Amino acid sequence: MGSMDPVATIVWIVSFVLVTVTVTGLSRRVGWSAPVVLVAVGAIVSYIPGVPQVQIQPEIILYGLLPPLLFAAAIQTSFVDVRARRDGILLLSVGLVVFTVIVVGFATWLVVPTLTLAAAFAFGAVVAPTDTVAVTAVAGRLHLPRRLVTLLEGESLLNDATALVALNATIAAIVSVVNPIAIATDFVLAVVVGVAVGLLVGYVLSTIRKQLRAPVLDTSIGLITPYLAFIPAQFLHGSGILAVVVAGLYLGYRSPTIQTAEARIAETINWRTISFLLENAVFLFIGLELAGIATGAFNSGITIGRTIVTSIVVLVALFVARFVWMILTTALYRYGPQRLRERGWNWATGIAVSFAGIRGVVTLAAVFLLPPGTPDREFLQFLAFIVVVGTLLEGLALPWVIRRLKLPPPDFQQESGEMQRLLAEAQTAGLAKLEQEVTGDEDQRVVERLRINAVFLADALENPTPPDGEDAAIAYQRLRRSMIKAERSAVLEARSEGRYQELAVRSVLAFLDAEESALKSSGPRKPMA
């Protein structure tokens, strides 16, 4: 945006957040795709008189928004699952990106004669990475198989690094002469330095956070962690994005051993809020850019016919590249080495992944990194916008594809049973520790209360309820939730009567919220609406 006084800036920021929250909430209520609706609303608003023209600053996106977005996704991603699927994720985040750069680069070069081959490959690198935000949103809404979700999230977390390294190489080819050895060296350096910095930052911060008992201090460190990983990696000519992802995966994995329960709850809530605002605001921001991007493109002499033809060719090339790569990858898993055949990757998985190539804000930020001397630079910026919108619309077909492929949804009952068994094991260990700690001087009512609560779930699982009766653990959760509701009402009534200080009221409400949250997380899961 242009320069505005501070008050006007604050008003626009508040309006931005309100529109984002309102549109997202309404979209979810009616079952529409929130990213698509936000882009449409932003595009419409961009043509309203008086609305400041949004001009993207790639440094703000790449250095300001992308690190926290990737970190928020990384700490919620299972390191164990990523490690188990590392071969498939690497095939997608490295192999597919390189293949896409080549296919889309040649296709764009053929239909835009004024482009040099280096500029066409640079555009291929711009549109190659999928969007973490959109893919995570789609995966969460469709209840895809866990294996498929891990592949898509792992791909979108890591392919940004590959695409930006490829973009840097092609930009260098635009302005000077490069050789394949230099490109390979830069790629290896980016990966090695990025991983090393991410691991180092994760290790150092895990050591520091283990000493912090105050959740506010732990949260404060957590909020700056993405930048602590990103900035040094970039300074050392490594991949800052890769450093952020590695640090997030490491800290997410170590979280149970380095943070207090209060710190984990606070971190989860804070990053969930930050992630929600940034993720959804990004799509509104994309739409708001339409007026400025379109103006620049048409001022460069672009024609409607050329735009339509080129857009169709680029979108088809993107889809074909992803589809062909997934066919080749699936064939490798089906007929390749024994180790890969044991992975159980079938044709349905390959087809589902091929329809999940949604692009987002990284593509729009990256296209503005093209140097001013790039042929048809404004036209390429407009094409990048078309790619983002086109792939978002393609993502709308994913639910239909999933239904046609008859991919099995997660087994919520099995997952609930596993959580119950794990909780029973944990409580059995706690009971054993209780027996070790008891000295005989404690009030027996305290000991018995602790013992009864710890033994209950294990007994319920070892002696299941008859088929025609309600499961004991489920009955306990149902009744305890009802009790918590009544207890909360009593606390609020006491507050209204002024019989207790506010500190006591808030403490008791927080205790009840924590217990209710624990009951929900350990109880049977239901498919989301």
Image: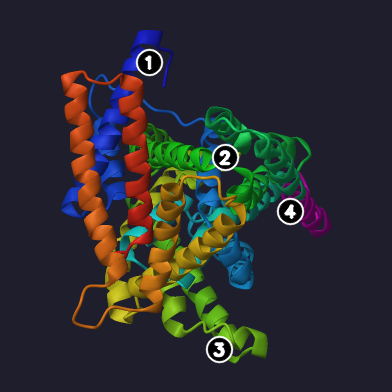
Secondary structure at badge 1 equals helix
Q: Dividing the picture into quarters, in which one does residue 355 lie?
A: bottom left
Say which element carries label 4: helix
Residue highlighted by disc 4: 191
Residue at 38 percent of width and 52 percent of height: 518
Label 2 secondary element: helix
Which residue appears at 63% of the width and 51% of the height?
254
x, y (%) of residue 278? Answer: 42, 37
Front of the two marks 2 and 1? 2
3D distance between C-alphas at marks 2 and 1: 23 Å
**Which quarter shows the N terminus?**
top left
Count all numbered tags in the image, as a single digit.
4
Disc 3 crowd, CA 10 A, few/some/many (<14, 14-19, 20+): some
Q: Residues within 10 Å of mark 4 (few under 14, many from 20)?
A: many
* Stretch in magenta: 176-195
In the image, what residue type sits under mark 2? Pro
* Mark nearer the N terminus (1 vs 4): 1
Instruction: List the residue tagged with mark 3.
Output: 334
Question: Which residue appears at 41% of the width and 49% of the height?
Answer: 445
Structural distance between the alpha carbons of marks 3 and 4: 29 Å
Is the Cβ of the residue at disc 2 closer than 8 Å to that at disc 1? no
